[in-house]
Image (cartoon, rainbow, N blue to C red):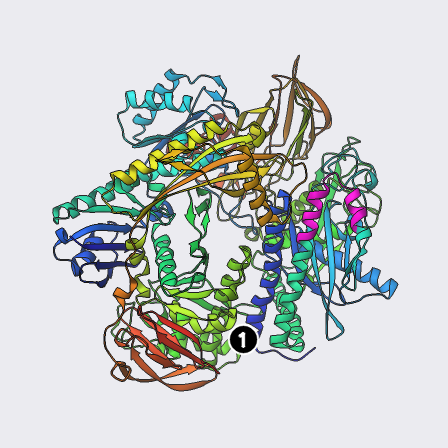
Amino acid sequence: MSKMIGVDVGGTFTDVFVLDEDHGVAEVAKVPTTRPDQAGGFLDGIGRRVKNLSEASVVVHGTTAGTNALLERKGAKIGVITTQGLRDVLEMRRRDRPRTWGLRGDFEPIVPRNRRLEVPERTLADGTIRVHVDLDAVDAAARTLIEYGCSAVAILFANAYANPENERRAIEAVRAVWPNEHVSCSSEILPEIREFERFSTTALNAYLQPEVSGYLNRLDTALDRGGFDGEFLIVQSNGGVMGTDTACRFPVRTALSGPAAGVIAAGHIARSAGFDNVITGDMGGTSFDVALIADGKSMLSPQTSIDFGMVVRTPMIEITTIGAGGGSIAWVDKGGLLNIGPESAGSVPGPVAYGQGNDRPTVTDANVVLGRIDPDNPIGGKLDRLDVEAAAKAIDVHVGSKLGLSMTEAAEAILTVANSRMAGAIRLVSIERGFDPKRFAFMPFGGGGALHTGAMLKEVGIGCAIVPRFPGVTSAMGCVIADMRQDFVQTINSLTSALDTEELAALIQTHVDDGLAVLVASASRFESRDVVIELDMAYVGQTHTVSVPLHTEMNQGQVAPPTTTDIESAFDEAYKATYGRLLKNGQRRVMNLRTAVIGRRPKFDLVTLAPTGGDLASALTGTRSVHFGDTWHETNIYDRLALPVGAKVKGPAILVQPDTTVLVDPGLIAEVDNCGNTIIAPKEA
Amino acid sequence: MSKTIDPITLAVLAGRMEQIADEMDATLFRAAFNPIIAEAHDASHGIYHAASGDTLVQGKSGLPIFVGVMSFAVKAVIDKAAEAVDLKDGDIYIFNDAHMGGTHLSDMRLVRPYFRDGELFCYLASVGHWHDVGGAVPGNYNPSATEAFQEAFILPPVKLSRAGEIQQDIIDILMRNTRLPQSAMGDLNGQLGALDLGVKRLDELLDEYGSETVSSALEALGDRAEALMRSELEGLPNGRWEATDFLDNDGITDVALPIKVAVEISDDTMTLDFEGTALRTAGPVNIALPTAVATAYVAIKHIFPDLPANAGVMRPIKVKVPEGSLLSAEFPAPVGGYTETILRMIDVIFSATAKAAPDRVVANAYGTINALSIAGKKKNGQRWVMFSFYGGGHGGSAESDGLNHGNAPISTATIPPMEILEAAYPVMFRQWALRPDSAGAGAQRGGLGAVYEIELLEEQAEAFLFGERGRFPPEGVAGGKSAAMNVFAFEQEDGWKHPPLASKMLGIKLKKGQAVRLETPGGGGYGQPSERDPAAVAHDVSEGYLTEDAATATYGPAWKDTQT
């Protein structure tokens, strides 16, 4: 009963990370993701490493089931019951458009207009009920939606964050005629001001509920049948885990589940290796995802758009994506400029070298022709040997001949431009948060990131890079590491001068009680339990709030009311840190209360993953001619996992493991640290 | 300067320089005090040519209209500095004069020469919309202004910094002339910070690549932008196409004002000639010449969205604006309502170009900003002003129906949430909905406009509206039909009323329980309505986008047979 299993289901591969705590060993597996039902790959992947599920104490899952259902518009048929006059809020959005330039494109909301029904009811902004909800109208609306064949319904009333009474009465009325577990209202899902964001989050949640809960139940049943007797947990977009019951109620919280787990793992690996500030770069087939961890903490953003007009407002690990992945296509525009992406060959058909029908060169093709990827051991595609000649021809035809460059020069040019764009993303992500990227270490993960490490160091001026021991399964590993976390929000909308601090304390207490109850009910062991309280505050007249950390006394689980002075001085401090100066005589307003209740799960010691024994000489598997800069170098190839702790490898060199290639550029040196990570830095002068 | 540059360095430098501008944007958005910059991103930054002021590179996140207008601000500074023969490293000019720099007086422009090895290398500029710059009306939106003096204080280009020394006198003058000095100071600091960052990044770039290489790259990028534009124009047929549309009135006299363009394409060049456009007006629908040229740029970028933000794009394009017209109004003509006029310019450019190449152009969007403010006093005597712009439909295109309830082509700003407005002001929205039958019919119809009905919850208030499209609807292209017009109504004791000047109204008195109702235009249709799939018509009917009667009247009865 001591194995912890992390399973990350991505678009192409399902990754499994198994930690055997008793024996201090970790194993990984990678199997193709199955579609449409991801349960097949999930169970197959676990089965590769764990024969008897009764040995496992916990299975943690990072899933894209929700994201895919949203992107592919494959959620349930749902209906909406809403305030008279407001049926179109979901469709009108915040009056934005898909792209700045061109004015093209339209938008189809996930609930068509004829399934958005209005009922007489109205609550005002101060919580006063102006019109009590017409329950006969709710009853009739529910019957209509049943007739339409809906399987879930969302109740979306104006200002329900200020007073949920009308929504609650409507929910009861719906349930009375329609016994259905997929009936939810906006004040339950997100009691926060801003109707479009609240309605959208609630409607998307309802849209996902039947699908995601069905999927999780299938997995649950299959795990049970395999003899699993432990706890099954799901990773949320905020980087914490939740139980499957919570996940079935709030499936919208899984929107960025997989990538969030990767960042959590990155943070832990970096911290263990002695780096509190790290920028991660996950290079996949179509994109390069950047996240920033400062002082050991990953950044959370309050909301994201899954697609145009599909806004989910729940805290998420902040990840910035640019369209420069391994499959991104290189092309020369009519003005004679070399461009990378945004068009991508993805993983199917994939790069030209995969031989699956694409004939336009990609970033991966450039890496292949320059000798950086071993053509005899392809990681993707279906060929036994990558088609180097086809890749070379494509680069020559589409880039080289158009720019008057040799094929090799053209391939270097593709990488130079791609690297420059990736470096740009790293710089911008840090600048936007007010950080100097030079203070950070870079951590590549995903299939292709470690091929571009040297370029990132050089372009951004970063001092060193950490390549985790298993960069290809970082998200699966993050599943095993993530804490249990629940986020709560409640709009307060009160001037500090008029704030009822007793009432605020009572709200915090409710959040804390609800959060702790979930931790208590969980079978997991926690090292500690943390409560993080923040207030969104601003001066009157400002719409932009700052996040103000609030430190409250807790005595045996009882929250002591904070004083108004505490709150005001906490605001001043946070405001000063953000804007540099305070506003004289400005009135301060508390907009929202946010509470996070976190159960810290024990972190396993990454030394567990370190290699034992081995020596540099026997890890050397051969040499290959690899192009760097303007010349070919005969380059040593090492079996990365066979390198011993403390091994130092001078560039140029290539370190190979089953799903990842680590490139050590000339002028750099790679060293294996005591956890098995590879630290890459410039050679000492 | 004319050293040829290798294609790899060029591609890398293109990205690096774009990023300098993007980082300047990011710096100001983060630091700005006022939400118009921080949230609506009503700001812009770029790098400009040392001699001509032409746009070399501009950030991607600023407001579309600035993409064309910023170089005029730099040109104004170049002229001023040339007059005084006085330009030093560390100088920073500041001004808001719209007749020199385009747009309106709320936009504060900072222009900083960048020197390398003692020589002027280029200019950096920053523009941001300040919350308040004096004038008769808080927030500087004065629909009854007949001179710029009534709109805001006017600052010509002056040195905010002399050789690195900030001139406190200038700051003192600025801060004494705004109702919100703290906000203005915060924004000013943010803009200065953005320029500092630009200088730092340019230093690094030039250290790394050398000024000669970077100069060559800048030149090559201009040439490339020009080549891209020429190749796009070569894809269009030769000929001359005209389009005329109208502004309802200038807010003072109820006379329609024609905006006319002739688009002439000759091989790889294009001329936009606005001969036939109305003369300068008394009310604030005038625009300054820089704004007119910048607007042409915005329209072109919408037609060819992949073109870079570089002045090279405009080299093959000639913009002819007749003297004395409302498109080249001279100081001190009021320009506060410039948004309405430039939206109409974009409409006629689209309509005329559609006659040449229908698949390249979308039909007209809703075409009015609809600046509505409701103001009053709360019980405690505190004054309140609810001010916002409202959305409408986008035009249909060869690919799809138009977007329902989008933002204006010159902006990317989003609308504040209804609940935020209701929490901040004593109003309740009875309706916040799509407007059925508002879309222009077509093979691909336009997007729907919206209906906003706003009830007053306090004893009394006044309402002001500055809108357009109350008399002339957004047009379709390629055989598509016009959309519904803007309709504004307000409730009085004896029923609903409409303003005599259609979509412009000053000081309507409202009592508790009375409402104003704004019905915004949809977008024009694309292609003949008879070519619309009857199933799509039936879908529009079942969704309530189109009433049954309107469906049959516009598209014929065929849709009825497709219903299941």
Label 1: few (<14), some (14–19) or many (≥20) C-alpha neighbours in 10 Å? many
Whether the magenta-drawn stretch holds residue A205 is answered as: no
Classify the position of the N terminus of chain B by image quarter: bottom right
Whether the magenta-drawn stretch holds residue B173 is answered as: yes
Does any portion of residue B336 appear in the rendered image? yes
Position of residue A451 measured from the top left corner of the image (x, y, whole percent): 39, 72
Q: Amino acid at mark 1?
A: Ile
- In the picture provided, is A341 more to the left or to the right than A20? right
Secondary structure predominantly adopted by residues drawn in magenta = helix
Q: Chain of mark 1?
A: B
Position of residue A217 measured from the top left corner of the image (x, y, whole percent): 21, 42
Q: Residue furthest right?
A: B84
Position of residue B553 measured from the top left corner of the image (x, y, whole percent): 51, 29
- In the picture provided, is B267 more to the left or to the right than A252? right
Question: Which residue lies under the disc numbered 1?
Answer: B8
In the rendered image, the vertical position of residue B418 relative to residue A232, given as above or below: above
Nearer-the-camera pick, A486 or A152: A486
In the rendered image, the vertical position of residue B220 relative to residue B369, given as above or below: below
Nearer-the-camera pick, B545 or A381: A381
Magenta range is B171-190
Q: Residue at x 44, y 62 (%)?
A: A278
Position of residue B4 measured from the top left corner of the image (x, y, whole percent): 63, 79
Q: Residue at x 87, y 63 (%)?
A: B84
Nearer-the-camera pick, A457 or B444: A457
Element carrying mark 1? helix
Does any portion of residue A284 appear in the rendered image? no
Name the image quarter holding residue B48: bottom right
